[in-house]
Amino acid sequence: MRKGLITMAVLLLSGAMLFASAAPETQAAEGPIELKFWSLFTGGDGEFFNAMIENFNASQDEIHMTNDMVRFDDYYTRLTTALAAGTAPDVIVLHQARLINYVPSGALLPLDDYVSDEMLADFQKAPLEACRMDGSLYAIPFDVHPIVMYSNKALLEEAGITELPQTAEEFVEAAKKVKETTGQWGSLIDNTTGTYKAYTLTRLFVSLVNQQGGSMLTDDYSAAAFNNEYGYNALVWLQELLNEGVNPNELDYDAAMNMFRLGEGAFYFNGVWATGTMEQEEGLDFVASPLPPFMGKSAAWTDSHTFAIPVQKNQDPAKVEAAIKFMDWMTANADQWALAGNIPTRNSVLEGEAFNALPYRADYAAAVSTVVANPPTPAWGEIYETMSDLLESAVTKNEDPQTALDSMESTVNEIISHY
Amino acid sequence: MRNRKTAIYRILEVLLILIWVFPLVWMVITSLKFENEVVTRNFTFLPENPTFQNYIDAFQSTYILRWLLNSLIISLVTMAATFILDAPIAYAFAKIKFPGRNILFWAVMAGMMVPFQVLIVPLYLQFNSYGLVNTLAAAIIPRLAMPIGIFILRQFYEGIPDALEEAAFIDGAGRLRTFVRIILPLGKAAATTVIILAFINAWNDFLWPLIAINESQKYTITVGIANFQGTHGTQYSLIMAGAVIASIPELIFFLIFRRKIIDGIAMTGIKG
Amino acid sequence: MIPGNKDTRDGILFSLPFLIVFVLFMVYPLLFGFYISFFQWNILGTPKFLGLQNYAELFQDAKFWSSLWHTVQFVLMTTPVLLVMGFLMALLVTSKSPLKGILETCFFVPYIFSMTVVATLWAWIMQKDFGIINQVLGLLGKEGVSWLTSDKNAMWSISIATYWWTAGFNMVLFTAGIKQISKEIYESAIVDGASTFQSIIHITIPLVKPTTILCLILQIIASFNVFGQVYVMTGGGPAGSTRVLIQYIYETGFSYFRMGYSAAMSYILFVIIMAVSVMQYVFLGRRND
């Protein structure tokens, strides 16, 4: 009988918890405003972001942020289901390229009435304007994060390379030389799905197509535009690195990062967000520089993390105000975010001492003018992920480049037709 | 000759045991290492400086205890509710002659063939419209419509002689009393099987809680660990520490109910 | 109806609680899902009626067919092996070995661990650069194997993790089946001079056939529903070579929010599983009787 009573008690208690939903809890009159935030920062910059949240919480006592880290591949799934269910957190982070998936359905709060002109005036034009749709501002840009090139100085020195390669041919030569003289890998471009898809291939492919003057989609975003010599050159070059044996095959994102950290390769490509992780590695002497103009002009894939406020059924003005304060603080103190490697978006930070004291950042921040904007079409998210799968297959299996491009083109057109 | 053969068998068996247990041992060993001993080219089997730091970090950087509690609540409620719902209808199917019984029975059994995955999209939309997404209840309710428990219980109840029931009726007992006093106690073994299976299935459920719950404090341990792995891709020793913590309650559950779990599963085989 | 007989009332009352749940959360979603499969709907916007277009598209969708094929591959790679392993384990566990208790516990224990723990653990064991298997191969001077990053190996690697995880379940079923065979049959076989091996072939295997069929059915259905291991261990990679159907359904539904298309695919999967199950009942069930 006692057993039965205990069971009953457990059941009753759990019954109360079962229906507890994430609906906005009533705010206690006293104490700080609690804001919830979901983060997708897992690619090397996560700990820097967590540290920033802690600093924000310590810097004032009106607002307390709680941060939830979500598996990157699940982030937008979680976000969309939460938006549909009305259980989204108070502030969210979104890639600029994804804004178009959420703005038309009215899921995000227009911010124009809440942000001061004074604050907006401090922002860089391009990233800020990218957050505006149909004349309204839907997000505040937190960073810009283009793809850059990381080079291991010790290995280059050992191989007798004094100048960083600037063209596609020079790069292959340099990589070969490293391989021959040091026995380590020439380049570490990840090309296989692991924790992440082979995004690096897509990022490089987009960059290389644009460097030749091409673009991924047609001007009206209605069809693929890379099935031409631009796409061909880009794909062949990515394959060549494997065929020449200077880049490992079946290399996933985490492995590439680990190998570069351990000094097992001379060149490594990733977003700027990896800089901070590399700097923490003892005994790694490296340099991070803007993506070289391998195939003509300077151009590099980029995206931007932005903050936005989901529309809630009962929008609490106090929370909106607090959220804006949070965004203001985060962007104004983005020199801390630059520790991870990311490029700040506010002039006051870019010109500030703290930021300019950091190595490399100023160099690649200057190159931000040559970044490639993501096509503003809701299909881009799916195109980007699917291209990563197809490029992975084309590169790791050394598929015939023309056949591979043909199939990429038809797949991309197919995707566009669904939106 | 015979002795040697036996000895070889014993050695092979010991080898098998070692192979089977090794992954678990390796999980624990990894969790006690520092990260730089894990991601290294200078491989060592045992940790040079064993550390509990990963466990501290796992507790601090996740809601792992919450996840365990959530899983426990979900599994216990599923277990209890499954039995409360399944036993009466199984009894009706086995012992009460009412019109339409056979059609109803086969209709319910057909539900056993429906792969749960077919239901995820409509169920999600359904729960979303009820405002139940992101609650633990959402993780439980769809499981209760699974008829497997009915199948097992009905088989068992059918084997209970009618004479026992009739004796109770003659003594003036009603249906409910007969069911509670006679059938349920006699069907204890089948009931144990059903609730153990319900518990294990609920504990291991992955796809549905992954979709139905979108806030990390409400994750189940299965979803939580997957998320943990996805957000700490290369911190293997930390992930293994999380996996060890996640496994301890299951191990305890198993050690306590070892015989009952195994016999319970065995029974589905004999009765099925 | 005999006067005073309350069978009809009782039957309904006893069935009702479950039936309500069953109709609400099984029958209704099944019909609702079928309805959705005729629409284009991204859950944040309004649904648009498409007619049969989702189904028409499905037959031309190479990704759908490749995902279905990967699922079938997984079924073929796991089912026979798991049956044989379960049976062999059951033989050990029912033998006279003094270690049989320990063996049973060891074989069964992985099954109680949750799928994500198992998948995470094996992903680490099979990690290409720092995983234990390749580290040991490295010490022996051998080249490491691309367990999860090569499309030739990835599905096998996932299968290996699955063997370790679930073989114990089948073992329990087989053990029960073997224990039901009466000892006298074996004894008379020994009298006739049969070896252990012969009695396994001629007595055990034929007599556990009902268990074998049960295991087969359960296993095929379980393998058709594979998702979690793949999702955690490879994410469907490399290059989508392990993307199984459930994962594709999940992605279209909950990453790209094409609810209608996702529902349409679920229905095709449903029809396939139904067909396989019915075929099993008809062929195996009948011969068994």
Image (tube, helix red, strand yellow):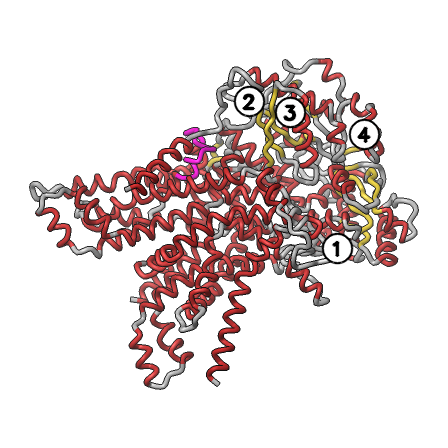
The answer as to whether the residues below labels 2 and 1 share one chain is yes
Specify the subunit that label 2 lies on: A
Give the residue pinned by disc 1.
A248
Q: Residue at x 73, y 13 (%)?
A: A118
Of marks 2 and 4, the one in the foreground: 2
Horizontal side of A254 relative to B149 (left or right) equals right
| Image quadrant containing the C terminus of chain B | bottom left
Q: Which residues are magenta?
A: B128-140
Q: Mark 1, residues whose alpha carbon is within 10 Å: few (<14), some, or many (≥20)?
A: many
Q: Earlier in the sequence, mark 2 or mark 4?
A: 2
Residue B227, compared with residue A50, is above or below; it is: below
Q: Mark 3, residues whose alpha carbon is within 10 Å: few (<14), some, or many (≥20)?
A: some
Q: Are marks 3 and 2 in contact (CB under 8 Å)?
A: no
Q: Which circle marks residue A57 in the picture?
A: 3
Residue C112 percent location from the top left of the image:
46, 53
Mark 1–mark 3 distance (CA, rounded to whole Å): 43 Å
Give the residue pinned by disc 2.
A311
Element at badge 4? helix
Give the residue pinned by disc 4.
A369
Specify the subunit that label 3 lies on: A
Element at badge 3? helix
**Residue B138 counted in the magenta span:** yes
Q: Amino acid at mark 2?
A: Val
Quadrant of residue C252 within the rendered picture: top right
Residue A380 percent location from the top left of the image:
65, 36
